[in-house]
Image (cartoon, rainbow, N blue to C red):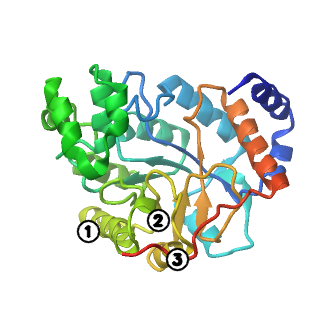
Amino acid sequence: MHRLRRLAARVVSLAPRRLQQQLSRARLFMPYYHMVSDERVAHFVRCVPHYPSTRRFEDELDFILRHYRPVSLDTVLQLASAPAATARDSFHISFDDGYREMHDVVAPILLRKGVPATFFVNTSLIDNARLHFNNKVSLFLERGGSADAAARFSWRDEAALNEAMAELGIDASAYARRVRPYLTTEQASAMIRQGFSFGSHGLDHIALGELGLSEQLRQATACADMVEATFLTRCSTFAFPGGDDGVSLEALRLLHGRFGATFGGANGFAPELPRHFQRLSLEYSNERIEMLLADRLLVEVGRRVSGRDRLQRPLEADAP
């Protein structure tokens, strides 16, 4: 956050929280995270470098609880079915990608503080059968790999990354078996028994905007079907992996034929469809949460004033 922007955020952060809530068009405050850990997590730190420590996460959660009321996923689904309804004094927190820290670190904290949450998982990663492409890149860089080389890797040609890792003596499969980065079936089942909700995050964590319509729908719905079959729980929500950039209105409406609500991550944009919610990442900076919220509000209001507060989506998805 550069100096002038930081100063403006500091001024806004001093305004009453109620006023800040009223200035935002968000129907519900929806913070989200990927990781909480006191360790430097080699397979993740290059993906989202500013993930919080346990202490920082608890402090941020305490701040949110002082100003917002926690609500369950059922409340989010009720808002989705009532286009005019808002709950600006409430929040629903969610966590993406299904890392094992969700079971080991996050769930105990949420239970102690009485906060419901939704965890979005990629079913191809549960039980640690493999290491995801993004996590491979992070591990490659942490073990001395070239940043220039990493920038050229693509999930469409993962073999090149595998070869580069092998040259450094990195066995991604062995790492996944040893470190167990993701939730196991048993851990996820235990969290569901504790009352947490689980949602679809796609089979393989591929940004849907890079796929054709039929594959977008398959990634989202097949993951949801596997969550329901494996954990015997309702899977009524989908969160777009890597954001919802490039996703058409046609795709969103088709997804809403399967899901009660979908979640994006385009901070500061005005609502588009009643059943599509934009969330706020609290990992993009090491600034205090008061500053992060003020900065996001500045971005939202600035876009609104300039007429750029709505995502420019294609009406129809690209073939195939």
Dot 2 crowding, Cα within 10 Å, few <14, some 14–19, many 20+? many
As drawn, 206 above or below 158: below
Looking at the image, which residue is at 46% across and 74% down? Answer: 255
**Quarter the C terminus occupies:** bottom left
Tell me the number on the disc at residue 316. 3
Residue 96: give x, y in percent of width and height.
43, 48
Residue wearing tag 2:
237
As drawn, the residue found furthest toward the top would be 144
Residue type, mark 3 in image: Glu
Residue type, mark 2 in image: Thr
Looking at the image, which residue is at 52% across and 77% down? Answer: 316
Dot 1 crowding, Cα within 10 Å, few <14, some 14–19, many 20+? few
Secondary element type, mark 2? strand
Q: Name the one closer to the observer, 278 or 112.
A: 278
Dot 3 crowding, Cα within 10 Å, few <14, some 14–19, many 20+? few
Q: Name the one closer to the observer, 36 or 233.
A: 36
Label 1 or label 3, whichever comes before in sequence order: 1
Q: How far apart are the alpha carbons under marks 3 and 2?
A: 22 Å
Label 2 or label 1, whichever comes before in sequence order: 1
Q: Which callout, 2 or 1, points to the residue nearer the camera?
A: 2
Residue 75 at least partly seen: no
Secondary element type, mark 3? loop
Residue wearing tag 1:
229
Residue 219: give x, y in percent of width and height.
34, 65
**Quarter the N terminus occupies:** top right
